[in-house]
Image: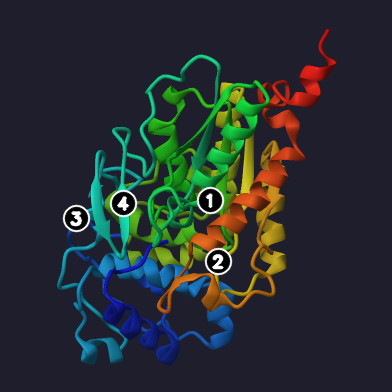
Amino acid sequence: MIRSSSQTVQFVATAAILAWGLAPGRLASGMPGRLRETLRNDQMSQADYEKMERGYYEQLLDAGRKLGAPGAIDPESAQRGRAEAQAVPFEGGPLALGVADLREFVLKPNLSVDHAGARWTTNALGMRDRAYEASKPPNTIRIAFVGDSIGAGWGIGDGQSFESILERELDARSRQAGGPAVEILNFAVPGHGPGQRWEHFSRVGWPTEPDLVLFESTQADLGWDERRLRGLLPRGIGWDSPMYRDVLRRAHVRPGGTVESYKPMLRPFREEFAAGVLRTAAADCRTHGVPIALVVVPRVGKATDKAEIQRLIASARDAGFSALFDLSDTYQGIEPNTLAVGPNDYHPNAQGHAMLARRLDAALQRQPRLLPQLASGSEEERGRRP
């Protein structure tokens, strides 16, 4: 999920959703640089909306990406439940470039820009991360991090994300104990749904030789792929993906449809699409002999639906994930406005990321089998050696 750089865009779009019951998933994922669809009134009750469109603000922020940057919505159109882009969307902006495949867009390599109140630096591999060698150095453990805008650290500065904090902690502790170096390569891309995250990693991540994959997820993932596919399928994208192929067949979906015609056909299978992504990710990792762990993180200011979280975790368990880390209660009991990056953007701030890093660090320490190379370098293990 990502946010528009314009608070005006967010305010108007939020007002439209709350007042008219719109579902931002109605926005099609059009060709980069052009909005192909407009917001329309879904005519859903509040109960239906809450049931079918969990994570409204995450979708809203994605809608903001499609609607683009500075003040580009006609208020009169927004009040009618429709809005059209008048500015360059995220794909054509300073951070990302469009690609003609399932991913839609990726981060540009070798960036160093200020965007949405934060410094964004990407390395030569196109990650918002420090520089790494393309091949894994000797005596090094590599962890691949697969995620969305939370994992990419939307709204905070370079090096403040929980992935970066965790890398520094694991590396320092391992080196102090005489163990290997630890690198966490961040493949997260803002706005990517689960299937897009895995597609991106599959294309660029395996050559980096990871020893463990961390798949970051939120409650919104249960419906994210279904929403993405509404816009991708009319463009001929996604039909052959092993993540979706079987579910599309069961849904009796055929080429030649539109965003609107596909919506009622895809929506009943929203959780099955998510499960298909998790099965594919787990199977790919087994093929490469690499463990994979699901990392469920919370969204600031959005109540957690424990039933949905448990269904997401159950899907990962059934898919054969090596470990399941539920961090969704990390912010429980804490005022959201103390953890958000801003009043109109509820991505976690630096404090929120630090909290996630501590929780994930503790969870990994309870699962030493995931990284036996790291465990073998601990002081306790070294003390047992002859």
The answer to whether residue 188 is visible is: yes
Furthest-top residue in this view? 386
Where in the figure is residue 26, as x and y percent of width and height? 37, 71
Tell me, what colour scheme is on the image?
rainbow
184 over 86 or under it: above or below: above
What residue does disc 1 label? 162
Badge 1 marks a residue whose secondary structure is: helix
Q: In this rendering, which labeled residue sits more in front, label 3 or label 2?
A: 2
Q: In this rendering, which labeled residue sits more in front, label 3 or label 4?
A: 4
Where in the figure is residue 110, as x and y percent of width and height? 25, 39
Residue type at tag 4? Trp
Label 3, residues with CA under 10 Å away: few <14, some 14-19, many ≥20: some
Q: CA distance from mark 3 to mark 4?
A: 16 Å
Q: Which residue appears at 23% of the width and 89% of the height?
A: 75
4 or 2: tag closer to the N-terminus: 4
Q: Which residue appears at 67% of the width and 21% of the height?
A: 373
What residue does disc 2 label? 299
Q: CA distance from mark 1 to mark 4?
A: 15 Å
What residue does disc 3 label? 92
What residue does disc 4 label? 120
342 over 108 or under it: above or below: below
Residue type at tag 1? Phe
Q: Which residue appears at 34% of the width and 65% of the height?
A: 259
Where in the figure is residue 123, as x and y percent of width and height? 31, 37
Residue type at tag 3? Gly
Instruction: Give 301 or 53, whichever is nearer the viewer.
Output: 301
Badge 2 marks a residue whose secondary structure is: loop
Badge 4 marks a residue whose secondary structure is: strand
